[in-house]
Amino acid sequence: MAFLWNGVTGIIREVQHVFQNKDLPKPGDMIQFQMPFFQHWGIYVGEDEVVHFSWPPVEWTKYKVRKEKIKDVQGVLKYAVWNKFDQKYPPLDPACVVKRARHMENKVLRYDARNANCEHFATLMRYDKAISDQAGRFNYTVDRDFEEEIRSYLDEVDCGSGEPLQRKTP
């Protein structure tokens, strides 16, 4: 019963946040989109644009990373800035977050709401960690193949040091 209660309270907290937060987005911020039955996530890249892993599907389970105006994201009831893991994980430099997200534009990836979704994508861009509270409520974790595919693209990105981002291996 606690499992169900924790899931419900997490959903309530996320819905409340999107309707109460009034922060203006800055490049590199995570954007939370409230959809009719779930949250969708992307990275703000400036000029009212967001890069997000989104529908419509290119193939049955393949979705594209898209850049579009926030106002053009389909199905949105409301949106807000929410860098919700900043207290737990240090975010990358905002310019690096934007560079990583922009580098992923038009890439086609396998989508699965449970373990390869838009929240995994957005947190990987901002924190270099693929996390999804929505999937985690049901005890799902990121698909390592999905994460590694994105990382293989991100290895091409220089975040200002002259070298690709150095990651600590577990």
Image (cartoon, rainbow, N blue to C red):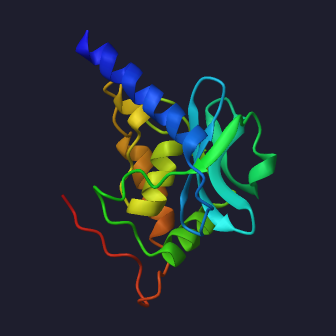
In-front residue for pair 134/167: 134
In-front residue for pair 124/79: 79
Q: Residue furthest bottom?
A: 162
Q: Quadrant of residue 20?
A: top right
Q: Is residue 141 above or below residue 47?
A: above
Q: Quadrant of residue 168?
A: bottom left
Residue ID at (40%, 54%)? 148
In-front residue for pair 125/148: 125
Q: Is residue 110 above or below residue 82?
A: above
Q: x%, y% of residue 60?
A: 67, 29
Q: Quadrant of the N terminus?
A: top left
Q: Residue furthest top?
A: 1
Residue 38 seen from this side: yes
Residue ID at (54%, 67%)? 28
Q: Quadrant of the C terminus?
A: bottom left
Q: x%, y% of residue 144?
A: 35, 45
Q: Is residue 96 above or below residue 69?
A: below
